[in-house]
Image (spheres, grey):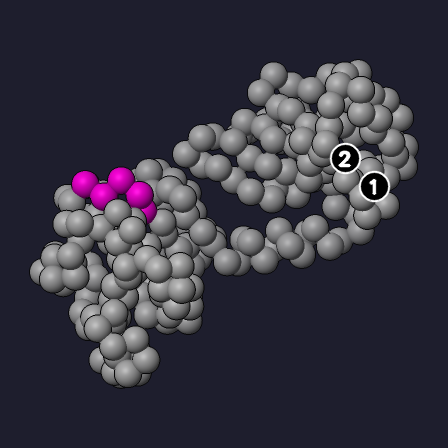
Amino acid sequence: MYILIAGGGKVGRTLTHELLKMRHEVTLIEQSATRYRLLEEELEHVAQHGDATELMVLERCGIQRAELVVAVTGDDEDNIVVCQVAREHYGVERVIARVNDPRNHDLFDLLGISPSVCATTSIMRLIEHELPDHELVPLLELRREGLEVVEVQLGDDVAQRQVSEIPLPEGARLIAVLRAGASDIAGPETIVRPGDQVLAIARSGLEDALRRALLT
């Protein structure tokens, strides 16, 4: 697969190395001349100098045949532009964008740029996961499919019952039950007990309904 990466910072550099190990063809575009020179010494012809928001630079790097474009610069506006141009002007079906400021996530969604990844949001979810009193933590969001994988921590006051007895909202399903370091794939007869951690998949917007069904 030919993959074009915009942004030669730590994220772009690491992605390039990993993808090359997987034997993909990769071009890494970096705008900073200083950083580009370092990347050129390390990656040789894989690194290209230029502004990835400019059509001339993208075409020089072969975007016409790119199967995936990844925008991981430190500027959200640049990442949006790169993904929009790749998809709408050159017909690249698969784009992935880095979101630097979590407040801009809705803008990426509004423009249909998906999937988008925000390190700050991901770290916050990990922090929430480690808090002893967390109830529901989003683990994975499948924006294109409109689905979300969440973890729910059941309190000590929750009644023991089978999965089939839980009034889950339409569009939600339990995946697994975690207890004492072990996990069990959730089926209709699986027992859910106080203190369990439950993994569920649900359509976006059903988080509150899912929480009520599991915690009451």
Q: Residue at x 45, y 30 (%)?
A: 145
In the rendered structure, find residue 184 and report the number of the disc placed on it: 2
Give the vertical position of 65 relative to 161 (above or below). below
Tell me where the magenta segment starts and ends, as one range: 91-95
Which of pointers 1 and 2 lies earlier in the amino acid sequence? 1
In the rendered structure, find residue 93 and report the number of the disc placed on it: none
Which image quadrant is residue 36 in? bottom left
Q: Residue at x 80, y 51 (%)?
A: 132
In the rendered structure, find residue 179 and report the number of the disc placed on it: 1
Q: Nearer the viewer, residue 77 or 113?
A: 113
Which image quadrant is residue 16 in? bottom left
User: Would residue 189 appear left or right of 83 to someone viewing this image?
Assistant: right
Q: Horizontal and vertical percent for residue 162?
A: 82, 21
User: Would residue 37 appear left or right of 74 to someone viewing this image?
Assistant: left
The Cα atoms of the two marked residues, 1 and 2, are separated by 8 Å
Give the vertical position of 165 relative to 13 (above or below). above
Magenta-colored stretch includes residue 34: no
Most distant residue in the front direction? 23
Q: Residue at x 41, y 48 (%)?
A: 116
Q: Horizontal and vertical percent for residue 146?
A: 47, 30
Residue type at tag 2: Asp
Confirm whether residue 94 shows in the render: yes
Tell me if label 1 and label 2 are in contact, CB under 8 Å: yes
Q: Residue at x 59, y 58 (%)?
A: 123
